[in-house]
Image: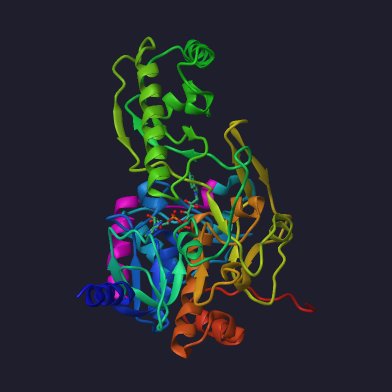
Amino acid sequence: MWKLMAIAVLVAVASPAGELYDVVVVGGGPAGIGAALAAAKAGAKTALVERDSVIGGTTVQAKVCDIGLFSAWKRQVIAGPAWDLVTNAVAAAHGTLPDFAAQRPDKWMESCVRVDPEVYSRLAEETLRKAGVTILANAEVAAVMRTVDGWDTGFAVGRQIVDTTGNATVAALAGARRVKSPDDLRQPGSFFFWISSKGAKFDAAAVDRAFKKAVADGELLPTDVHVGMSFFIRKGGGSGCYIPLADNSTPEARAATNRRGIEARDRVLAFIRRQSGLENVSLVSSAREVGVRETYRVVGEKTITERDYLDGVVEEDALCWSYWMVDAHSAKMSHARLVFHKEGKIGSVPLGAMLPKGVCDMLVAGRAVSSDHGANSALRVQASCMAMGQAAGVVAALAAARRCDPREVPLADIKARLSEIGHIVPLLEKGK
Ligand SMILES: Cc1cc2nc3c(=O)[nH]c(=O)nc-3n(C[C@H](O)[C@H](O)[C@H](O)COP(=O)(O)OP(=O)(O)OC[C@H]3O[C@@H](n4cnc5c(N)ncnc54)[C@H](O)[C@@H]3O)c2cc1C
C-alpha cells in the first residue's frame, strides 16, 4: 500500500504541470512582450507567464513610461512588433511620437516615446492575444524541471524558454550562474509618486534648508529626494525618490523594497506638509511598485562590456542594436555616471550574451542579459529590452521548430526570420 502511494506521488511530481508550448516566455515586461510577439510571429505556439495580474513589467508597475531609445544618430534602429505596439499605444492615447530627425544625444529624454502605462498594458495584452499568445497571469515561476520535451515551469512546458524576468530567475533555477554588482556600485531603485503641489506658493530656499536639517537630524534620508526638495515639490513629484539596493528578485526582497518605497514616500509627504504654504499638499497617485534598475545579470556565453558597447563593436552574432549612454545611477552621490557614445557609434547585443552558459534550450533577454555593470546601465532601457526580446523570441521559435538548441540554429536563418518580422538586424561593417 505505502509502496503504491509512493509511486503515485513520484508520478505526480514528475508529470508536467502545464500544456506543452514551443516557446514559453517568463516575464511580461518590455523584453517579454517583444519575445512573445516575435516568437508567435515566427510561427511558434507561445505562452507568456507573468507573476503580476497585468502585462507591462517596469513600464506599468513602476510607471516608467518614457520608452527609449528606438533611434540613434537620427535614424530608427529598433523596429518590429514591439515598436508597432508602442506606436499603437501612442495613437490610442492621442500622444505624439518624437521627431527622430531632430535627435540630440544630450537631450535623450526628448527622443523617448511616452506611453500611458494603462493604455499600453491593455493594448499589449490585446496584441499578444491577437498574435495567438496564451497569457498566464498571476503565475510566479519558482522552480523549473527538465522534461523529455524541454523545461516545465510549473505553469507551462516549453521546448524553449525565454527568461525575461529581469533577474535571470529561470536561468538560475535551471543552473545558470548570475552575478550582481557590489552593494556600493549597484544602482538604486526609484519610487514614483505624485503630489498636489503644482502652483503652491512657498519659500524654496527655506524648504531646501529645512530638508538639509531634516536629513542631518535623521528624519529623512538624503536619497528620499535626490533632485532637490523645492524642485521636486514644484514639479508635483514624479521621479526623484531613490530606494538604495532595491531588489525584486525574490518575493521577500520585493516586499521589503516596496515597503521601503512607501515609507520613503510617507516621510517625504509628512515633511512637505510641515512646510509653510504646503500644509494642504496631498498624495495624488503612486506607482504600483518601486522601479528596480539593477539586480542580477546572467553569465552568458559572451559578456557585453562597457568598452565594446560604447565603441559600437558589432560581432557576427549581433542580433539587435541598443542605443543609450552608460547611465549608472549612484544612490550615494545622488547622480548618474553618464558616458556617451562617440559620434555615429551604436551598441549591439550578440546572441552569445543571451545564451546562459551551461544551460540548453533557454535564452535570457532584457535587463538581465550577460553584461558588465557599465554596459548594463545602458542596455537595460526599454526599447533595447524589446529588441533583445524580439531576437530571443525568434531564435527560440526556430530552435523549437528544429528540435535543437539555440546554439545550433544557423545565424543566417535567424537574421532572415528577424528581418521578415520587421526587426532591424545590425550589419557587420565591411572588412570585419
Ligand atoms: C526608476 C527607473 C527609471 C527608468 N527610466 C527609464 C527611461 O527613462 N527610459 C527607458 O527606456 N528605460 C528606463 N528604465 C529601464 C527600464 O524600465 C527597465 O530596465 C526595463 O523595463 C527592463 O525590462 P525587462 O523586460 O528586462 O524587465 P522588467 O520590466 O523588470 O519586466 C520583468 C517582468 O517579469 C516578471 N517576473 C519577474 N520574475 C518572475 C517570475 N519568477 N515568474 C513570472 N514573472 C516574473 C515581472 O513581474 C515583470 O513583469 C528605468 C528603470 C527604472 C527602474
Query: At 29% across and 32% down in the image, what residue appears?
Result: 284
Q: Which residues are magenta?
A: 109-132
Where is residue 290, by image quadrant? top left
Q: Position of residue 37 (x, y in %)?
A: 39, 72
Q: Main secondary structure of the magenta part?
A: helix
Residue at the image position 57 percent from the left and 66 percent from the top: 77
Question: Left or right of 347: which side holds 43?
Answer: left
Nearest the viewer among 123 and 35 is 35
- Residue 6 percent location from the top left of the image: 27, 73
Instruction: Classify 103 as above or below 386.
Output: above
Up/down of 381 relative to 418, above or below: above
Q: Can you name the residue that lies furthest to the bottom here?
A: 402
Q: Can you see residue 84?
A: no
Q: Quadrant of the N terminus?
A: bottom left
Mark yes or no: residue 353 visible: yes
Specify whether residue 286 is painted magenta.
Answer: no
Residue 366 pos. (x, y %): 51, 61
Quarter of the C terminus within the rendering: bottom right
State left or right for residue 187 relative to residue 279: right
Q: Residue at x 59, y 87 (%)?
A: 410
